[in-house]
Image (cartoon, rainbow, N blue to C red):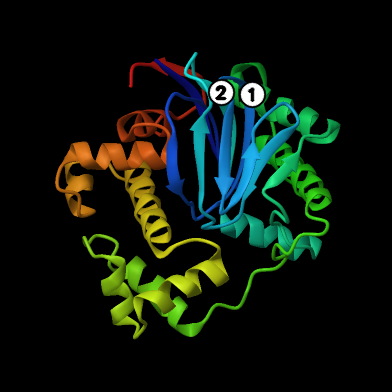
Amino acid sequence: METYALHEGAFGRAVVLELRDDLIAHAHAEVQLALWLGGARVEGHVGSELVPYGEHLALGTNSYESHDARLLDRSGPAVFLVLYIAKPWLDQRRDLTGRPFHFASPRVPIDPAVRQSCWRVLDKIVSPHEHPGADVDGEVENLLSAAIESSMTSAVGTDRLTATPTLNHRLRSAIAYMREHVNEPIGVEEIAAKVGLSRGHFFALFRDQLHTTPQVFWSAVRVEEAVRRLVQQEEPLTSVALDLGFSSPGNFSRFFRDHMGVSPSRFRQVASVAAPRLLTGVA
């Protein structure tokens, strides 16, 4: 069984989900905040840094940062509240406040402000009928602001970047090429060659400027496109799978579950619900 709730807002998506298996190293276009709510113990890597989820520690990742998740026991699922924060919303908040909205450290201490804000967001997206007209976006902003402030305290003495770097022009060209050819089954070596880089230089640029690998970034671009098509279009999953270069719907489903923690069919089912509500069903 899978039980989760999804709320779509101007900020992006808020999801409550049960994680029953490990997630491979992956990335998202959005900034992500993942808070462990209970169940099986979980740890995750952001790059080479290990973050043990718990009552007092959440995980924050910036756009396209590689991260994974590993269940430390198989006694049952782990339950999470995960916020996927869209770049346009973050840019708007940065312009309004004059401060960047990013995580200075992937280790986000859960202090009282973060904890209280987390439970308010959770309450409103799991029980929307009890909070008609609730300002979920406002609650998410409060939670994100509190989490970013908390991450700053754990970043003292580290060399983690505190600002978005200016990307190398060939790296920008590679990213543009990935987006233009997201429906084609191309490899990272081919992408490197298209922008005039050796495989080693290509990997080094992604490592040094985006703290990820070309393959993880390329998979994130494909996941982003898959999510867009699942939410905005009604085409069969088989068509989505084949159009994104997968040899079969089964391979696409495994790819999507490995990166998002849920099957594409269940993701579409919840995303298509007009009013956010708790759904329970079989994967």
Q: Disc 2 marks which amino acid?
A: Val
Q: Is residue 97 above or below residue 116?
A: below
Frontmost residue, 141 versus 58: 58
Q: Disc 1 marks which amino acid?
A: Leu
**In the image, residue 100 lies at what x, y percent?**
73, 62
Q: Is residue 158 above or below residue 229?
A: below
**In the image, residue 58 lies at what x, y percent?**
68, 37
In the picture, measured across the screen, residue 273 lies left or right of residue 207, that is left
According to the picture, the residue beneath numbered tag 1 turns out to be 37
**In the image, residue 32 lies at what x, y percent?**
59, 46
| Label 2: few (<14), some (14–19) or many (≥20) C-alpha neighbours in 10 Å | many
Tell me, yes or no, if residue 195 can be seen here.
yes
Q: Is residue 127 above or below residue 105?
A: above
Frontmost residue, 283 versus 12: 283
In the picture, measured across the screen, residue 216 lies left or right of residue 127, that is left
State the separation of the CA atoms marked 2 and 1.
5 Å
Q: Earlier in the sequence, mark 2 or mark 1?
A: 1
In the picture, measured across the screen, residue 111 lies left or right of residue 175, that is right
Q: Are marks 2 and 1 in contact (CB under 8 Å)?
A: yes
Frontmost residue, 273 versus 258: 258
**In the image, residue 278 lies at what x, y percent?**
50, 19
| Label 1: few (<14), some (14–19) or many (≥20) C-alpha neighbours in 10 Å | many
According to the picture, the residue beneath numbered tag 2 turns out to be 79
SS at badge 1:
strand
Frontmost residue, 172 versus 160: 160
Q: Residue at x 25, y 42 (%)?
A: 252
Determine which quarter of the picture holds residue 115. Answer: top right
The C terminus sits in image quarter: top left
The N terminus sits in image quarter: top left
